[in-house]
């Protein structure tokens, strides 16, 4: 069975690196999009605990006005349930933020 993932990246390079690595897993319906940041004074803080274990917790990041880009890059798709943790590790290694 497949599980859905959504991740955000601050740079297009990080997104493309994660996308290339995710191709080694059983993924499908993978889409890439950019999301403009219109209000840079407020923080964007997605936080998701991947599992309820301390060894596999999500993390939060705040994007501030000083960031060099005005866009976030979004990667979403489906991954085989048996490879979901590997997909989340790939996203984290490429500075992605899971939603």
Image (tube, rainbow, N blue to C red):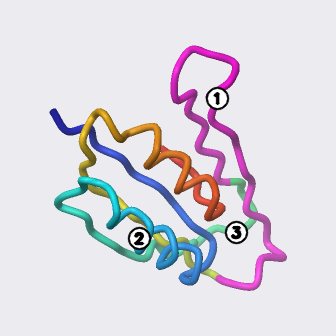
Mark 2 / mark 3, whichever is N-terminal: 2
Name the residue nearer the viewer: 58 or 65.
Answer: 58
Name the residue nearer the viewer: 65 or 24.
Answer: 24
Query: Which residue appears at 35% of the width and 41% of the height?
Result: 83
Q: Is residue 4 above or below residue 51?
A: below
Image position of 16 (left or right of 2): right
Mark 1 / mark 3, whichever is N-terminal: 3
Query: Which residue appears at 61% of the width and 78% of the height?
Result: 11
For label 3, the residue is 40
Q: How many marks?
A: 3
Looking at the image, the residue that sits furthest to the right is: 66
**Main secondary structure of the magenta stretch:** loop
**Circle 1/circle 2 CB separation < 8 Å:** no
For label 2, the residue is 19
Q: CA distance from mark 2 to mark 3?
A: 26 Å
Which span of residues is magenta-colored? 44-69
Mark whose residue sits in front, 1 or 3:
1
Image position of 50 (left or right of 41): left
When asked about the image quadrant of residue 48, the answer is top right
Local secondary structure at mark 2? helix
Local secondary structure at mark 1? loop
């Amino acid at each position: 069975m497949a599980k859905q993932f959504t991740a955000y990246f601050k740079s297009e390079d990080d997104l493309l690196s994660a996308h290339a690595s995710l191709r080694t897993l059983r993924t499908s319906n993978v889409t890439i999009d950019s999301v403009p940041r219109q209000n840079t004074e407020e923080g964007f803080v997605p936080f998701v605990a991947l599992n309820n274990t301390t060894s596999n917790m999500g993390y939060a990041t705040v994007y501030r006005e000083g960031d060099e880009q005005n866009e976030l890059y979004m990667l979403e798709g489906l991954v085989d349930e048996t490879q979901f943790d590997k997909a989340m590790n790939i996203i984290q290694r490429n500075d992605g933020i899971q939603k």
